[in-house]
Image (cartoon, grey):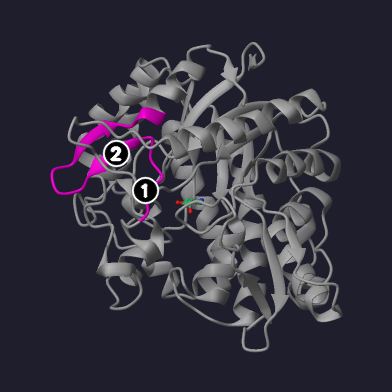
C-alpha cells in the first residue's frame, strides 16, 4: 500500500556544529567543552575528536549541493557558540559568524529553509570554567550570544530553536558524565536543568526583541520509559527517568512547573520571576525521537536508574536501541495531548546507526536504514491520521558524523563519509529519502 504525505509536508535533514564542522582551531574559534572532553584520554571511543570531523567548515558547498540534490525543503544545523564568541562572551569573532553567514546564503540559494539551532551541546570552555550550566549567569551570557546571532542572521533565518535535547545537556553532561563536561553529581543536574530552562526563556525573549516574525521553538527529546517490573523500586526509577529525560524541560517551559518526582529537588533553585522568564510562547513544538526503553532500580547508579538492555532477538539498531515505530506514534499522540495541542509539530531528528560500508561497486546498500525510515515514517502518517498536526520530519543525519562519546564508530548518515579522504557517498537510503522529499508516496509494508 502506498500512501502520500499531506500537501506542504516539510522534509528536512539535520546536523550539528561539533559533529560535522572540524576546523577546531581555525579562524579564531575558541575551545568548547567537547574539544576539552574529547582530548581527555578515555572519554571518547578510540580517542576520536571533532578536530576534523566531516571537514564541513571547508566542504560546506559540497554538503549544500547534497542537500539541494536531495530535494529537502529545510536544513537544520547549529551554530558553534565558541566559533562566534571564542570566550563565550565579549568580542565577536568576525570570521566565525561569516562562516554561518555564507552557509545561510548558500542554503537559501539552494531553495532550502535554514533552521538554526543555537545550542547543540558545545558550550565554550571559558564558560564551563565559570561553572558552566550550573552557573545561573550562563543563562544571561547565552542570551547575549543569541542576540549576536539573531542580529546577524535574523534577516534571512526565520526558524530558530534555542536548544537541542536540553535533557542530555543536563543529565548526560552533569549527571551521567559520559558527555562533556563529564560531571557526575545529582546537585549539578538540578542546577543545570534550571539554568538551561532560564537560558531558553531569555533566549526566546531576545529573539523576539531583536526581530519580529521569527518562528521559535526548542527541540525536546522523548522516549517512552516503562518499568522493568511492577516492583515499587522499578516504578520509582522509571518515574525519575521519565521526569529527567522526558518532562523536565517541556513541563517547565510549557506548563510552568517541574514534574514529580524532581519538583522538590528543583524548588530551592527557583527565584522570584523565574517562571515568567522560562514560560515563553512557542511557535512550534519540536522533538527528536529514537527509541523506547525499560528501566529498573539500580543500587549502584547515581540516580538508582538502570536501563534494561534490549533483549537479543529484538530488532535494534547498532546503538542497541529497539526499533519500535509504534512507540514513536505513541509519543506524537501523547505530546499533543500533554503539551502542544494545535501547535504545528515537527520531528527534528529521527534516524538510525547501522554498520554500513561502501561495497566494491561503490554503493552503500544496507536496506536496514531504508526499512527503519519506512517504519518510522509510517508512524508519522498514522499520527497524522489520528489528528496530530505533524508538519515536517527531519532525518538524522545528512552525513555520518562524530557520534559524541562513541566517536566515528556509529554511522547515522544518509550520506556515507570516508573519514580518510572526506569523500561523500550518498547511501541507498539517501535515494529512498529523496523520492519522498520530492513528493513520492511511502510504500508501506
Ligand atoms: O547524534 C545525536 C545528536 O547529536 C542528538 N540526538 C541523538 C543523535 C544520535 O545519538
Q: Nearer the viewer, residue 356 or 330?
A: 356
Q: Give the mark nearest the N terminus, 2 or 1.
A: 1
- Taking 38 as reference, is 204 above or below it? above
- Rendering coords of residue 254 (x, y %): 78, 48
The crowd level at tag 2 (other Cα within 10 Å; few <14, some 14-19, many 20+) is: many
- Quarter holding the N terminus? top right
- Taking 313 as reference, is 306 above or below it? below
Q: Nearer the viewer, residue 283 or 420?
A: 420
Query: Which residue occupies 54% across, 41% down?
Result: 349
Q: Is 427 covered by the magenta stretch?
A: yes
- Taking 61 as reference, is 337 above or below it? below
Q: Nearer the viewer, residue 66 or 364?
A: 364
Q: Is residue 353 left or right of residue 225?
A: left
Q: Farthest residue toward the left?
A: 421
Q: Which residue is mark 1?
A: 411
Q: Which residue is mark 2?
A: 416
Query: Which residue occupies 49% across, 51% down?
Result: 317
- Rendering coords of residue 445 (x, y %): 62, 26
Q: Nearer the viewer, residue 45 or 61?
A: 45
Helix, strand or loop for disc 1 = loop
**Quarter where residue 228 is shown:** bottom right
Q: For the residue with label 2, is its CB less than 8 Å from the closest atom of ligand 1?
A: no
Amino acid at each position: 500500500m502506498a500512501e502520500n504525505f499531506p500537501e506542504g509536508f516539510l522534509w528536512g535533514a539535520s546536523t550539528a556544529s561539533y559533529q560535522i564542522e572540524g576546523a577546531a582551531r581555525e579562524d579564531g574559534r575558541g575551545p568548547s567543552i567537547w574539544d576539552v572532553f574529547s582530548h581527555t584520554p578515555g572519554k571518547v571511543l578510540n580517542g576520536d575528536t571533532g578536530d576534523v570531523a566531516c571537514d564541513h567548515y571547508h566542504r560546506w558547498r559540497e554538503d549544500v549541493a547534497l542537500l539541494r540534490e536531495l530535494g529537502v525543503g529545510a536544513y537544520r544545523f547549529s551554530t558553534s557558540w565558541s566559533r562566534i564568541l571564542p570566550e563565550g562572551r565579549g568580542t565577536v569573532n568576525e570570521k566565525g559568524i561569516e562562516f554561518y553567514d555564507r552557509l545561510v546564503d548558500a542554503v537559501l540559494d539552494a531553495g532550502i529553509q535554514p533552521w538554526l539551532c543555537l545550542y547543540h551541546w558545545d558550550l565554550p570552555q571559558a564558560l564551563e570554567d565559570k561553572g558552566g550550566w550550573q552557573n545561573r549567569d550562563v543563562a544571561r551570557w547565552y542570551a547575549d550570544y543569541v542576540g549576536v546571532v539573531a542580529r546577524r542572521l535574523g534577516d534571512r533565518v526565520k526558524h530558530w530553536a534555542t536548544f537541542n535535547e536540553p535533557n542530555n545537556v543536563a543529565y548526560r553532561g552533569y549527571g551521567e558524565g559520559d558527555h562533556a563536561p563529564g560531571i557526575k553529581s545529582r546537585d549539578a543536574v538540578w542546577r543545570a536543568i534550571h539554568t538551561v530552562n532560564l537560558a531558553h526563556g531569555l533566549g526566546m525573549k531576545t529573539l523576539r526583541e531583536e526581530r519580529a516574525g521569527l518562528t521559535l521553538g526548542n527541540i525536546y527529546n522523548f522516549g517512552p520509559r516503562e518499568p522493568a517490573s511492577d516492583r515499587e523500586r522499578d516504578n520509582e526509577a522509571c518515574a525519575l527517568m521519565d521526569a529527567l529525560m522526558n518532562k523536565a524541560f517541556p513541563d517547565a517551559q510549557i506548563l510552568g512547573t517541574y514534574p514529580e518526582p524532581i519538583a522538590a529537588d528543583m524548588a530551592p533553585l527557583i527565584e522570584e520571576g523565574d517562571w515568567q522568564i522560562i514560560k515563553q510562547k512557542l511557535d512550534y513544538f519540536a522533538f527528536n525521537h529514537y527509541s523506547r526503553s525499560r528501566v529498573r532500580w539500580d543500587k549502584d547508579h547515581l540516580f538508582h536508574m538502570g536501563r534494561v538492555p534490549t533483549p537479543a532477538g529484538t530488532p535494534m539498531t547498532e546503538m542497541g536501541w529497539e526499533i519500535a515505530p509504534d512507540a514513536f506514534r505513541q509519543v506524537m499522540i501523547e505530546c499533543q495531548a500533554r503539551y502542544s495541542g494545535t501547535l504545528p509539530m515537527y520531528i527534528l531528528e529521527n534516524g538510525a546507526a547501522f554498520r554500513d560500508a561502501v561495497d566494491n561497486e561503490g554503493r552503500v546498500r544496507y536496506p536496514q536504514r531504508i526499512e527503519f525510515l519506512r517504519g518510522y515514517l509510517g508512524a508519522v502518517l498514522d499520527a497524522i491520521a489520528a489528528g496530530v498536526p505533524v508538519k515536517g520530519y527531519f532525518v538524522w543525519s545528512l552525513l555520518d558524523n562524530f557520534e559524541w562519546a562513541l566517536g566515528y564508530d556509529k554511522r547515522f548518515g544518509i550520506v556515507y563519509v570516508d573519514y580518510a579522504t572526506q569523500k561523500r557517498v550518498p547511501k541507498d537510503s539517501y535515494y529512498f529519502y529523496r523520492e519522498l522529499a520530492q513528493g513520492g508516496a511511502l510504500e508501506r509494508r
